Amino acid sequence: MSILVTGGAGYIGSHTCLELLNAGYKVVVVDNLNNSKVESLSRIKEITGKELSFYKVELLDKNEVERVFAENKIEAVVHFAGLKAVGESVRIPLYYYYNNIAGTLILCEIMNKFGIHKMVFSSSAAVYGEPQSVPISENVPLGPANPYGRTKLMIEEILQDLYISSPNWSIALLRYFNPIGAHPSGKIGEDPSGIPNNLMPYITQVAAGKLKELHIFGNDYPTSDGTGVRDYIHVVDIAKGHLKAVEKILTQTGVGAYNLGTGKGYSVLEMVNAFDRATGEKIPYKMVAPRPGDVASCYADPTKAIEELDWIAEKGMEEMCLDAWRWQKNNPNGNGD
Ligand code: NAD
Ligand code: WQD
């Protein structure tokens, strides 16, 4: 029996495939390579010494997805495939709604057809929108602030309805906070196309001399130093959270949402200083206006995942910075090298 990983060639998917293989699972990856390269899968094989199956398949192509299920004995699905750029989702919302939601509907329909009812879904802290207070627990009212976040909330609701319709479904909704870093081997990591939107890849590209300086978006927030606070979490910890969630859905039915975060918030300036301390690289920066839509502070209460998934984030900020930097230095052009 295999675990099907949609979006398995991407950033979080590739780290999760690696952990699944190391834990002894067989892995089948489906990815259209829209935001990733097949090289990440070769690197996983290199690190683990194990094989995985890969289908370059578009999730919106029902016949092709069905073929993957027909050709493999799938036990459960870890569903990463989706578009994730918040700004782009505001500019071209239909593309986001169609890709993320229709892709999930097709996947669920085919799972139903093959009698497979176990899924781990990549949700996001984006479902919370502007938090009323921090840390954020799973049971607060949800209110995503952009189309990307709304696709995640809508999919969560679709999956809840599936469970209500048929209680043999078993679904874990994992709400990640801010995944950063890379595998300690330096062989797989985040490979953003163009100028990065997110803080850590921007910092590593400044350190590498690809970008001139970091622009810090806002220094007048009600936080300890005025810059925005987030819950940065090592991508390997996130991947291990999927392993725990897979174990849970394989043994129990039900649907549950879990925050995957460390529970600690770091400001942008604290991140810049942590990167400097860990790597010895000074990051030039300048303060600029806040980025529209950003919130002052967002970090998780991870208690539910600790108690119900038996998972806890283990890696600290120094490791996150060192691993992100090793990946950048070893792969100046990401997976394109
Ligand atoms: P990523 O872009 O690196 O990986 C997503 C993968 O899905 C890519 O390889 C892409 O080619 C593939 N894909 C997209 N649409 C597809 C389709 N229609 N058919 C087949 N393949 C398709 O992104 P990531 O950072 O690894 O994120 C994985 C998941 O986690 C996404 O659903 C994302 O929304 C979610 N998430 C990411 C973050 C983050 O900060 N990285 C935070 C919270 C949630
Ligand atoms: C972090 C902090 C910025 C870049 C996004 C998505 C979220 C989730 C994770 C998918 C903020 C500041 C950033 C820069 C800066 N993704 N910053 N200069 O916005 O918390 O979350 O990624 O689900 O949905 O919105 O992450 O890394 O973009 O920003 O000052 O060049 O760094 O203002 O305070 P964010 P981020």
Image (tube, rainbow, N blue to C red):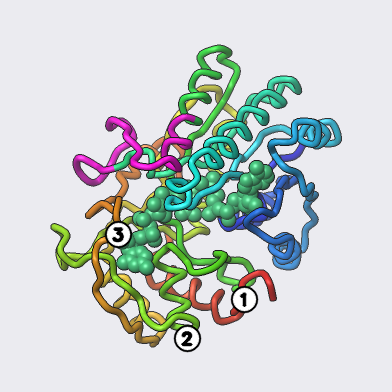
Q: Which residue is mark 1?
A: 333
As rendered, which of 236 and 227 lies closer to the eye? 227
Report ligand 2 position as a quadrant.
bottom left
Count of marks overlaid on the render: 3
Range of residues picked out in magenta: 130-154
SS majority, magenta:
loop
Tell me which residue sits at (61%, 32%) in the image: 104
First in residue order: circle 2 vs circle 1: 2
First in residue order: circle 3 vs circle 1: 3
Q: Which residue is mark 2?
A: 209
Residue furthest to the top: 165
How many angstroms separate mark 3 from mark 2 (CA)?
Answer: 23 Å
Task: Check disc 2 and give the amino acid type.
Answer: Gly
Would you identify the image quadrant in which residue 48 lies? bottom right
- Front position among marks 3 and 2: 3
Q: Which residue is mark 3?
A: 291
How dense is the environment of label 2, judged by Cα within 10 Å: few (below 14), some, or many (20 and up)? few
